[in-house]
Amino acid sequence: MPKELCKCGQVLYLGEIPNPVEWQIISDVEFDRYTGQIDAEMLYADTKPMLVCPHCHRLLVYWQGFSNGYTAYRQEE
């Protein structure tokens, strides 16, 4: 099963569908291009995958897709 390791050491499993730790994000500009009946596959292609670590709540954003690694964002104290 594919997995990702968060910077806190938590293992995030990617194989579950739907995946409770995976989110899809899209910019407001990209989203605004969609009107009327929407093709879910086309919308999905315009999103960026993001994982939310259930342990530390970091956001792991894959700006260039899963194969290019993630950028981690942590909540401020």
Image (cartoon, rainbow, N blue to C red):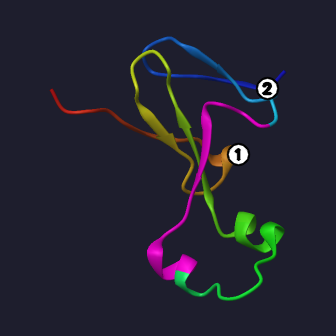
Would residue 25 be counted in the magenta stretch? yes
**SS under mark 2:** loop
Q: Nearer the viewer, residue 16 or 5?
A: 16
Q: Residue at x 66, y 53 (%)?
A: 65
Q: Is residue 27 left or right of residue 24?
A: left
Tell me where residue 21 appears, x and y as whole percent. 61, 31
Would residue 28 be counted in the magenta stretch? yes
Which-is-in-front pick, marks 1 and 2?
Answer: 2
Q: Amino acid at mark 2?
A: Pro
Which residue is situated farthest in the left direction here?
A: 77
Q: Nearer the viewer, residue 19 or 61?
A: 19
Read off the magenta span: 18-31
Q: Quadrant of the N terminus?
A: top right
Question: Dot 1, how many residues are within 10 Å of its Cα: few (below 14), some (14-19), or many (20+)?
Answer: few
Q: Residue at x 76, y 78 (%)?
A: 38
Q: To which residue does mark 2 refer? A: 2
Q: To which residue does mark 1 refer? A: 67
Which residue is situated farthest in the top direction here?
A: 9
Q: Amino acid at mark 1?
A: Ser
Q: CA distance from mark 1 to mark 2?
A: 12 Å
| Residue 14 occupies quadrant | top right
**SS under mark 1:** helix
Q: Residue at x 77, y 37 (%)?
A: 18
Reply above or below: 33 against 51.
below
Tell me where residue 51 appears, x and y as whole percent. 56, 36
Tell me where residue 3 appears, x and y as whole percent. 71, 23
Q: Nearer the viewer, residue 12 or 33?
A: 33
Q: Is residue 47 left or right of residue 27?
A: right
On residue 44, the disc is none
Reply above or below: 4 against 47.
above
| Residue 56 occupies quadrant | top left
